[in-house]
Image (spheres, grey):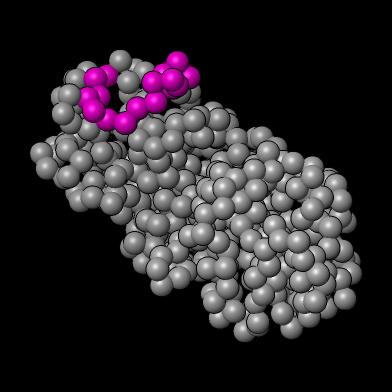
Amino acid sequence: MTYIDEGTQFVGKRVLVRVDLNVSIDATGVTEIAKLHAAQETIEYIRKAGGIVTLATHLGRPKGEVVSSLSTSMLVPAIEKVFGAQVIHIDQFEDDWQEQVSRLSDAQIGVLENVQFSPGEVDNSKEYAKRLAAPFDLFVMDCFGQSHRAYASIVGIPAYLPSAMGLLVKKELLELKPLLEGPKKPFVAIIGGAKMSTKLPVIHELSKRADAVVLGGGIVNTVLAAAGYKIGASICDQSLIRQAKKITTLGRVLMPVDVIVGKKDGSGHKVVRVEETKVLCTEEEMILDIGPESVRIAEALVARAGTILWNGALGYFEQEPYHAATQSLVLAIAQATEAGVHTVIGGGETLQAMNLWSAADAVSFASTGGGAMLTLLSGKTLPGIAQGT
């Protein structure tokens, strides 16, 4: 699959663009538009080249059911504000929807109804992909954040339409692939968050390529449990204990030397050194952050790095005092970026933390896809990128 800036002709063409506009919405409408701005370059490129654009996206996880609160009609005001164009909401489940697409002018932008209102989306139904493709001349895949999903609107449509990848996907691949092929040394990766299943493959892969892989967040609990520590009420993926045990044997992977233990409401917190006891928590306590000495080790690695990758918070940062490690890392990465270090972050939780401490722009590159980024960096193929190549 080529990129849209490699000779694709758009004049007079009806172009379906798969974007990731799965944004936060409340009663007042869209509350953050970072993903819309991320898709802006591709959409404007096609429109300036004479294409008539219709967007396809999902909101939430409706699981094949029509959920009115997840209708993409909620996106219309925000899209109109960003592009200064009339936006037409088109329900592809209605009989006349293809006619509505045919009536769009180049001064308008179409937005399809939530593609996940059909069970055929997640099931990668050929019939649903063919239905989505029917009124269009071209398909542009610009949804990096969902490119690790084999969904109908991502991998199915290219079977029925000439297809290309958008500028956002190109930018993501240009930034992320060098982390596997030849990052500036020392290369330091910080992997946190809570979901162990998504982090295991990337930890294994990065242990071969990075000079140091620093672990934090809830994934640490599973590794500590696998190593025989008592972790009380801490979150832990028992199904991955065997695989987690292997992490402790990997070279260059750094476990915390101390942790912050307490109750989820912030009470009763204390620092516990990992080497001093096998009982890190009572049954009523949880590990909720890495400790100050572990933070100092991470900060020292960041200060000496040539390239930094960060995905996942180091603790339960939404609740004081368990924000300390994540806040320290945010500030350290911002300082490293200012000093000329190449810094790459990804994942919703990571971006949330950067925003919380007003450092969202203080990185070299912020990936729009946490899961897709992890899949790519674990050496696996992204179905949405591989399709048609």
Q: Left or right: 279 with respect to 68? A: left
Task: Identify the residue at horizontal 25%, vertical 33% (top origin).
Answer: 287
Task: Identify the residue at horizontal 66%, vertical 35% (top origin).
Answer: 380
Residue 176 spot, x, y in % from top left:
62, 49
Residue 357 spot, x, y in % from top left:
33, 63
Residue 84 vertical placement versus 165 (above, below): below
* Picture quadrant of residue 119: top right
Can residue 166 be seen in this snapshot? no
Residue 240 vertical placement versus 115 (above, below): above
Magenta stretch?
229-246
Front position in the image: 175 or 186: 175
Task: Identify the residue at horizontal 79%, vertical 53% (top origin).
Answer: 131
* Picture quadrant of residue 356: bottom left
Task: Identify the residue at horizontal 44%, vertical 56% (top origin).
Answer: 351
Q: Left or right: 67 with respect to 270? A: right
* Magenta stretch holds residue 87: no
Q: How many marks?
A: 0
| Most distant residue in the left direction | 268
Front position in the image: 335 or 239: 239
Residue 348 spot, x, y in % from top left:
46, 52
Can residue 310 be seen in this snapshot? yes
* Magenta stretch holds residue 231: yes
| Most distant residue in the front direction | 95
Residue 30 spot, x, y in % from top left:
47, 69
Quadrant containing the C terminus is top right
